[in-house]
Amino acid sequence: MNDREAELISRCQQGDQDALKEIFNQYHKKVYRIAYGVVRHREDALDVVQEVFIKLFRSIKNFKGKSAFYTYLYRLAMNTAIDHSRKAKRTTFLSLDEEGSFQPSDGHEKRPDHIAARKELEEKVRWAIDQLPQDQKATMIYREIEELSYQEIAEAMGCSVGTVMSRLHYGRKKLKDLLKDIVKGREGE
């Protein structure tokens, strides 16, 4: 933790709302990506972000600095998003115009049939990710979306690096199994 971050946390612990605003400005995009990766709906992800920062402001007095601050915040974000997802009990998929979607790169891929095929593939991949157990799904989001190291993921999830590696291995294996028909079909093209 750098000196500036330590100062901000200290100010937050004393109830300084301006310091919380600075932390929000620094981390809200990352929290949103985590939330969106779990809940898959823009408005729900924004609700989760708001809830995370409210919880952070209420609980920051308990932060002792034993782990990195972003680890504390990411764990709070992941747990809040998972809780929100359980409450909502719904699955939605991105459309081509929402963030995180595949973008056509050349004229050939802008054809309606290619856009439709890409959208269908994207929906199948997102469906497959949603089939993973929560711990594997969370680990995949931390690694593939947030690009955290194994050690950072272990700290955020409160488990060992070996457990992180195992969850990634079995999560990827399950995704491969769920998507094997798609992979076979694309190899034939």
Image (cartoon, rainbow, N blue to C red):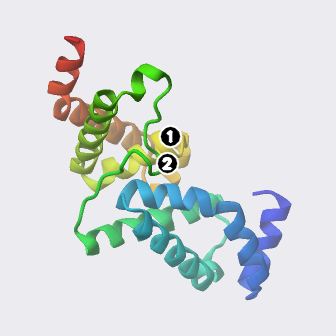
SS assignment at label 2: helix
What residue do we see at 41% from left, 53% from top?
37
Residue 108 coordinates in the image, percent (x, y): 41, 20
Residue 75 lies, with reference to residue 121, above or below; the image says: below
* Quarter in which the C terminus is drawn: top left
User: What label does residue 150 carry, if any?
Assistant: 1
User: What label does residue 107 carry, if any?
Assistant: none
Q: Amino acid at mark 2?
A: Ile
SS assignment at label 1: helix
Residue 131 lies, with reference to residue 80, above or below; the image says: above
Residue 155 coordinates in the image, percent (x, y): 52, 53
Locate residue 116: give its quadrant: top left
Q: Nearer the viewer, residue 13 or 123?
A: 123
**Mark 2, residues whose alpha carbon is within 10 Å: few (<14), some, or many (≥20)?**
many
User: 93 left or right of 42?
Assistant: left
Locate residue 182: give its quadrant: top left
Locate residue 80: give its quadrant: bottom left
- Residue 36 shows up from this direction: yes
Q: Nearer the viewer, residue 57 or 34?
A: 34
> Disc 2 marks which residue?
153
What residue do we see at 36% from left, 57% from top?
40
Q: Amino acid at mark 1?
A: Tyr
Residue 76 coordinates in the image, percent (x, y): 50, 68
State yes or no: discs 1 and 2 in contact (Cβ < 8 Å).
yes
**What is the tally of numbered marks visible in this picture?**
2
